[in-house]
């Protein structure tokens, strides 16, 4: 249970950072990741060249390494040149992730409800996560304008919900023993 508490606190902290620093850091972070992909892809292509000169690798290995290099460079250039487009696609992915977290938390609560009497308040955050996930998926372009706010609030809610649920279950399990 301690790992859940630590994970919850980390998710809350990440959510707070995403909310507070959202405007300044999102394009920079996306472009930094893009630069990392370009460098990684260039290193892969350089390795293809070096290994080809030495005659060390098989053709299939060289093809895979070259394909990974070209794909990495292409993705990196896309991130460097179009962080906004990447951001809207990322918002769709994050919306699906929030839906998955909301469904997971609801499922865990429903399983716990069979053994314990849980307050209806325990269901509020998972339902909010589902609502936020749907809003992000339905309006990814509007959500892309405030990605860190939407996802940051979702992360804070997910972390608080996990933390509260874990602490509650720890308390209840001690009372049962």
Image (cartoon, grey):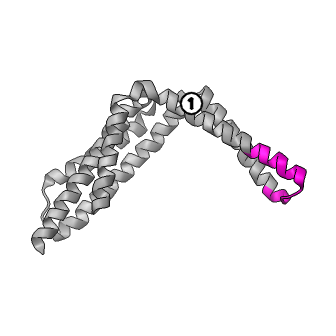
* 144 relative position to 68: left or right: left
Figure disc tally: 1
Residue 134 vertical placement versus 83 (above, below): below
Image location of residue 68, percent across then percent down: 71, 48
> Magenta segment range?
44-61
Magenta stretch: helix, strand or loop mostly:
helix
Residue under label 1: 31
Residue 154 vertical placement versus 53 (above, below): above
Q: Residues within 10 Å of mark 1 (few under 14, many from 20)?
A: many
Image location of residue 150, percent across then percent down: 35, 35
Query: Is residue 159 at all visible to an observer of this figure?
Result: yes
Residue in view at x 59 percent, y 27 percent: 82
| Image quadrant containing the C terminus | bottom left
Image location of residue 106, percent across then percent down: 27, 57
| Mark 1: secondary structure | helix
> In the picture, residue 3 is in which quadrant?
bottom left
Residue at the top extreme of this rendering? 24
Query: Is residue 131 at all visible to an observer of this figure?
Result: no
Residue 37 vertical placement versus 108 (above, below): above
Residue nearest the observer in this picture, 169 or 121: 169
């Amino acid at each position: 249970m301690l790992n859940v508490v630590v994970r919850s606190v980390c998710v809350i902290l990440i959510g707070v950072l995403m909310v507070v620093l959202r405007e300044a850091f999102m394009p920079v972070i996306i472009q930094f990741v893009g630069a990392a992909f370009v460098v990684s892809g260039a290193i892969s292509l350089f390795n293809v060249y070096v290994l080809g000169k030495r005659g060390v690798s098989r053709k299939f290995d060289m093809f895979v390494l070259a394909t990974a290099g070209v794909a990495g460079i292409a993705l990196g250039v896309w991130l460097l040149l179009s962080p906004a487009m990447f951001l809207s696609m990322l918002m769709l992915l994050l919306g699906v992730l929030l839906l998955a977290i909301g469904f997971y938390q609801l499922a865990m609560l429903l399983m716990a409800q069979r053994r314990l009497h849980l307050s209806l308040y325990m269901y509020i955050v998972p339902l909010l996560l589902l609502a936020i996930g749907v809003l992000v998926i339905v309006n990814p372009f509007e959500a892309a304008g405030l990605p860190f706010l939407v996802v940051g609030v979702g992360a804070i809610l997910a972390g608080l919900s996990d933390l509260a649920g874990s602490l509650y279950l720890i308390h209840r399990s001690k009372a049962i023993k």
